[in-house]
Amino acid sequence: MAKLDPKTFGNFYRVLTGVVVPRPIAFVSTISPDGVNNLAPYSFFNAVASSPPTIVFSSSRRAGSKSKDTLDNVEATGEFVVNIVSDDIAEAMNRTAAEFPANVSEFEVAGLTPGASDIVRAPRVAESPVNMECRLQQVVNLGEGDHQHGLVIGEVVLLHIRDDIIDGHRVNHHLLKPTGRLAGSMYCHTADVFEMVRPIYQPDSAPAGTGEQR
Ligand SMILES: Cc1cc2nc3c(=O)[nH]c(=O)nc-3n(C[C@H](O)[C@H](O)[C@H](O)COP(=O)(O)O)c2cc1C
């Protein structure tokens, strides 16, 4: 087994993001204090608590000479929307990832439609099957110098989901078609699924049974 020490192995980021895969993609929409809609993908992203429903994504502070508009807008307004990237909008998502200046709306660049949110000012991506309206809880600063990141912690205050995708609490992933991010410019579809029911520990009887789990 190779052993990689992050302190001496150059560009460790590439290996880290190559092994923590597949990552979901938060397509984050915000609005600037001047009213410019912004949209960008973030794959340092996950759901991390259930009550209150909490998501996180992490943005580097800078992209070359400019700061990231998403993080600037989140810190200025305290609000954002996380839109789920499905295979149907994956190419449009990729078009928004260039470092456009703050006065450019990536909705127009990508040909996506800003829809009104119910609670926050930031717009939703109308073409996305799921939109989560979020309020900023906290930004945790990570790293130093050129490697500073803002870990955005947000509470989901309203979730929009396309009717055909949800039945009660059950989400149909064949219809959702979420896109996964692998390393660099590689992505995956998530259609190849299998079921494995989690066992329940029963101290007085062996072997362990199975059942519905959270
Ligand atoms: C699929 C994908 C995932 C990305 N994930 C991140 C991420 O987690 N953190 C980050 O800082 N940049 C990430 N980026 C780069 C940003 O999307 C890019 O810097 C973008 O221009 C930022 O836009 P903004 O300045 O409008 O926020 C990602 C790019 C792609 C294509």
Image (spheres, rainbow, N blue to C red):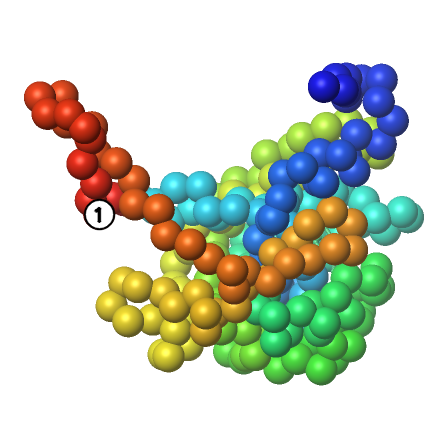
- Among the 4 quarters of the image, the one containing residue 209: top left
Residue furthest out toward the left: 204
At 20% across and 30% down in the image, what residue appears? 208
> Whereabouts is ligand 1, in terms of quadrant?
bottom right
At 25% across and 44% down in the image, what residue appears? 213
Query: Mark 1: which secondary structure?
Result: loop
- Residue 13 in the image: state x and y as whole percent: 77, 35
Q: Which of 16 and 68 is in front in this view?
A: 16
Is 113 positioned to the left or the right of 118 in the image? right
Q: Nearer the viewer, residue 9 or 33?
A: 9
Amino acid type, residue under disc 1 in the picture: Glu
Q: In which quarter of the image is the N terminus?
A: top right
At 62% across and 44% down in the image, what residue appears? 21
Q: Nearer the viewer, residue 2 or 120?
A: 2
Is 213 positioned to the left or the right of 117 in the image? left
At 69% across and 61% down in the image, what residue appears? 40
Is 1 positioned to the left or the right of 86 in the image? right
Relative to residue 1, is residue 86 depicted above or below?
Answer: below
Is the residue marked by circle 1 packed among few (<14), some (14-19), or many (20+) residues within 10 Å?
few
- Residue 180 in the image: state x and y as whole percent: 61, 56
Residue 124 seen in the current view: no
Relative to residue 201, is residue 101 depicted above or below?
Answer: below
Residue 143 seen in the current view: yes
Relative to residue 81, is residue 141 depicted above or below?
Answer: above
- Residue 124 in the image: state x and y as whole percent: 54, 72
Residue furthest out toward the right: 65
- Among the 4 quarters of the image, the one containing residue 20: top right
Residue furthest out toward the front: 207
Q: Quadrant of the C terminus?
A: top left
